[in-house]
Image (tube, rainbow, N blue to C red):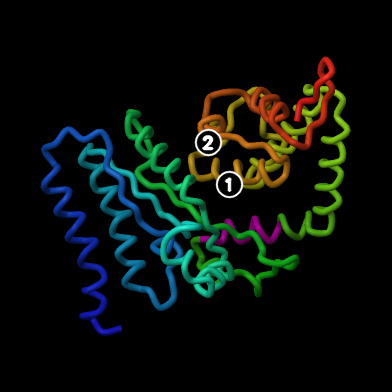
Amino acid sequence: MPFTDFVEVVRPKVQGTWNLHDQLSDADLEFFILLSSASGVIGNRAQAAYAAGSTFLDAFALYRRQLNLPAISLDLGVILGVGYVARNQQVQAQLDQISLKGIAENELLALIKVAIDEQSKPTYSHQSSAGIDLEPSSDQLTFATLPYWAHDPKFSHLRKQALSHHSSTGTRSNTTETSFIQLLREAKTVEEAAALIANQIARKVAAVMGIDTSDVRMEESLSKYGVDSLSAVELRNWLWKEMKATVRLFELLADIPIKDLAENIATKSKMVKVETGGSEVA
């Protein structure tokens, strides 16, 4: 890539961000959000300039925080349904192959809302990352089939966790999933369904956060285990896929015990059929 091409791509983000910072440095801002890209974290072949510009935005958010000024950089993946990727199926297929998973437009708006709310707190993370995972695109997950970015040493902990989890659960995952769904459908009370869901949530949180399931306490909230706005999006999508329950982000981020959250989900899940005074909870 010629240096002139590199500068042409990077300069708008760098100069534009500095201009906003300079012009608004004396303003009493409640929030300052930079929309960056996961490419700055994982790198993106043939898009070095784009990745560099994204890395600058992340660094600039940290710089503003060191000045005690509000700033959060959202490292986004693919936005589904709108924009360039939505209009180019081939690009979407390429991104799927490297495990860049998408989020819907309404999820993006929810992330921005959470980022705004977060900056009203005395302390918060200056940066959030979204849209990357190590879920296999097929039934087989090996070192050789991992996306190129997962071979980077800084992702070794994610790589090890993904390979270990797949190896230990791969042959039993379908059976376990079927068993859970069957038990959920056969639950006689909301409380029974809630207990099943709470245990499943504990397993999911443990897998996502890299901890033992036994360490997840039902009396604690999800935030106790490091669940933030971005991992909450993953959990929300999982709850719909597995339990057909629509749960809002603020419910997952609220300071409520997992057991209470599970009971709320049980009343919403379309998988739960419980007779209550002649009607069904579903």
Give the residue drawn at x 53%, y 38%.
226
Give the residue drawn at x 74%, y 33%.
197
Label 1 sits on what residue type?
Answer: Glu
Q: Quadrant of the N terminus?
A: bottom left
Residue 249: image tag: 2
Residue assigned mark 1: 234
Give the residue drawn at x 49%, y 57%.
81
88 relative to 143 in the view: left or right: left
Give the residue drawn at x 32%, y 67%.
52
Above or below: residue 151 compared with residue 161 = below
Percent x, y of residue 239: 66, 41
- The residues colored magenta run 155-164
Q: Residue 111: which quarter of the image? A: top left
Q: Secondary structure at mark 2?
A: helix
Percent x, y of residue 175: 86, 51
32 relative to 172 in the view: left or right: left
Q: Residue 18: which quarter of the image? A: bottom left
- Please report whichever mark, 1 or 2, sits nearer to the chain's N-terminal start: 1
Q: Nearer the viewer, residue 115 or 204?
A: 115
Label 2 sits on what residue type?
Answer: Leu
Q: Secondary structure at mark 1?
A: helix
Residue 5: image tag: none
Q: Nearer the viewer, residue 149 or 270?
A: 270
